[in-house]
Image (cartoon, rainbow, N blue to C red):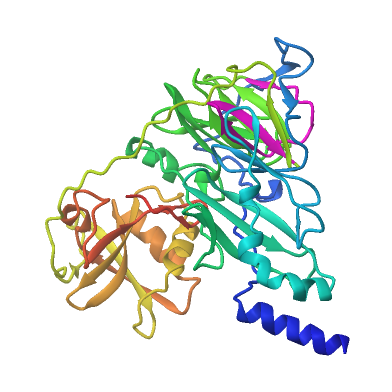
Amino acid sequence: MQSQFRVVLMVVLAGAGCSKDHPEAQPRPEPSLAPQPSAATAVPRASSVSPERSSPPNGKYDYEVFRGALGRAYGLKRAALICEEPCRFPEETKQRVWLVRDGRAEPADQYWPRAVWGRYTSAMQQAKLQTRVTFFGDYPQELYAWGAVESRSGDGNLPLVKWSSDAWQRDHREFPSTRWTLPPREYDAALLSAPVDFNPLFSFAYGADAPPMTSKGGLLAIHTGKAWDTRPAPWAGAVQLTRLADGSTLALNRGAWLVSSKGEITALRIEKSLAEKSVTIAGDAWILGSYTLSRPSVPGRFKVAQLPLRTSRGRPPTQPGKIANPSGFDRRCKTPAVLIEHTDGTPLYGTELPSLFAEVPGEGAGLEAYVADFELGERSVVQAQDLAAAERVLDALKSHPDLRGELTCSDLRSLLPDPYARTEHLRRVFIHARSGVVLELT
């Protein structure tokens, strides 16, 4: 009888679209995977880490636990949601929820998704299943809820729902993709060359008249305007960076540090020792860690910078139609290009070009990736600044017997003077060379 009911429950949940997948989590690269600084970026120097901890101006801590409501705290970028424990569905008693957006906890029980998940209550209670509820999003534009059991089978997972028009509604996706905030275009060169082996947007700070910064295990990297300058740092892995209004940067990875615009690092004192990410509340950087919300002990001390927005240029391309076939390469060619396809003549799949790009020595220097629709058909193309750069691509292809590259002469850059513009027949593919991650720069 138990096994029969289990089958019935699985059918009910599957028919309703319950997923066993979790929402995409923030990447947490392992320290051991962080690349060592190359000869071009490594700068021998004494540690910039201060041997002294901060001296909080008010009390024992720079950050103190927020006690306006008790429960599990979830970050919503510009607010936080606190869900009273145990924060599980189906709930045994009335579930209480609070929203923190201006420094106070205000009752927000409407954000408990019983109305949309109520249809699963009876079956889950009979099966003695309870699901941990997770909230995430970018308040007030987006608020999502997800229910996931703490078991390998995934039985009892609940579908992704979104708060819209003052009510919970089933979302059409299994889970939303991460929406990164892109910096203005003047930071793209620094972003694409960031000396990290994961999506550089995860740990990238800019604005407030301070230089761009990124991080990885044991290192802080500062962009000088021409190149990345690395120096020692006390954190074990990549840290989440939040640029503050005074040009300093808040760095979080279990611990918390304040980084000056010159790269001087000072450890902060936090009441709870675990810090994972920041949440902007009433203009200040609050800290979320282990589902605990912490606020600055002195309001306004860690004011978040108002970052400049990315704008669109909209310059039209010079070649709106199909691209003329490239010519054969000779030593007079100033615009070498490597055409890449499978040995059976089929185009590269979506992830193959970025993966190959990451294998080419030189971290993408002197190379640009395109997808071009020539008269001979669609090809993935790596435009090289010179023959030496093109030969690095051809050397990387030698370890891929299923791919082939042809050295040709073609000036795709001149056909797309605005690299962010794209047509049906030509587009630039922006690849972070260290990680092979495609950045959707527009």
Would residue 47 be found to the left or right of residue 412 on screen? right
Would residue 299 be found to the left or right of residue 292 on screen? left
Extreme right residue here? 1
Would residue 29 be found to the left or right of residue 329 on screen? right
Segment tinted magenta in the rendering: 265-289
Q: How many marks?
A: 0
Which of the two residues, 128 or 261, is positioned nearer the viewer here? 128
The image quadrant where one finds the N terminus is bottom right
- Is 22 situated above or below 83? below
Would residue 354 be found to the left or right of residue 115 on screen? left
Q: Measuring from the top left, give residue 426's x and y in whole percent.
A: 23, 63
Q: Measuring from the top left, give residue 171's x and y in whole percent.
A: 52, 65
Extreme top residue here? 57
Which of the two residues, 80 or 168, is positioned nearer the viewer here? 168
Question: Looking at the image, which residue is at 39% across and 65% down?
Answer: 394
**Residue 123 lies in quadrant:** bottom right
On the question of residue 20 being in view, the answer is: no
Question: Looking at the image, which residue is at 62% across and 18% down?
Answer: 299
Question: Looking at the image, which residue is at 30% across and 55% down?
Answer: 384
Question: Looking at the image, which residue is at 42% across and 38% down?
Answer: 190
Which of the two residues, 337 or 96, is positioned nearer the viewer here? 96
Q: Measuring from the top left, give residue 107's x and y in whole percent.
A: 66, 39
Residue 254: say if magenta: no
